[in-house]
């Protein structure tokens, strides 16, 4: 397993939305309907878009609880 992957999940767990309707909300806590809206509209470019796409995949597969466990660790 690549060593940077666990760090990426910890970073995802502790990153808040920097803009929009859910500004200040942890990415993993953004409601699923909003993440699906971004999926349909197109995720933003850059790191935040990559992280939102990962949140989409986690929620789609019912795995967001794994990331919630990593908050503030």
Image: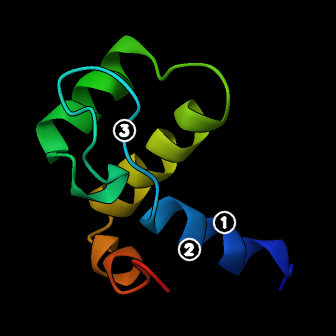
Residue in view at x 65 percent, y 36 percent: 47
Identify whether 28 is placed above or below 21. below
Question: Who comes first in sequence, dot 1 or dot 3?
Answer: 1
How far is mark 2 from mark 1, CA to CA?
5 Å
The quarter holding residue 28 reads bottom left
- Residue 1 point in image, percent of width and height: 83, 86
- Residue 44 point in image, percent of width and height: 52, 19
The residue at which mark 1 appears reads as: 8
For the residue carrying disc 3, how many other residues have a C-alpha within 10 Å: few (<14), some (14-19), or many (20+)? Answer: some
How far is mark 3 from mark 2, CA to CA?
15 Å
Q: Are marks 2 and 1 in contact (CB under 8 Å)?
A: yes
Identify whether 68 is placed above or below 21. below
The residue at which mark 2 appears reads as: 10
Pick whichever, 32 or 71, lies toward us. 71
The residue at which mark 3 appears reads as: 17
**Residue 22 in the figure: left or right of residue 15:** left
Secondary structure of residue under mark 2: helix
The quarter holding residue 69 reads bottom left
Question: Who comes first in sequence, dot 3 or dot 2?
Answer: 2
């Amino acid at each position: 397993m690549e060593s940077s992957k666990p760090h990426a999940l910890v970073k995802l767990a502790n990153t808040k939305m920097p803009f929009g309707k859910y500004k200040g909300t942890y990415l993993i806590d953004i409601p699923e309907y909003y993440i699906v809206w971004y999926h349909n509209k197109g995720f933003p470019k850059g790191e935040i878009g990559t992280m939102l796409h990962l949140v989409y995949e986690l929620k789609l597969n019912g795995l967001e609880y794994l990331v919630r466990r990593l908050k503030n660790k």
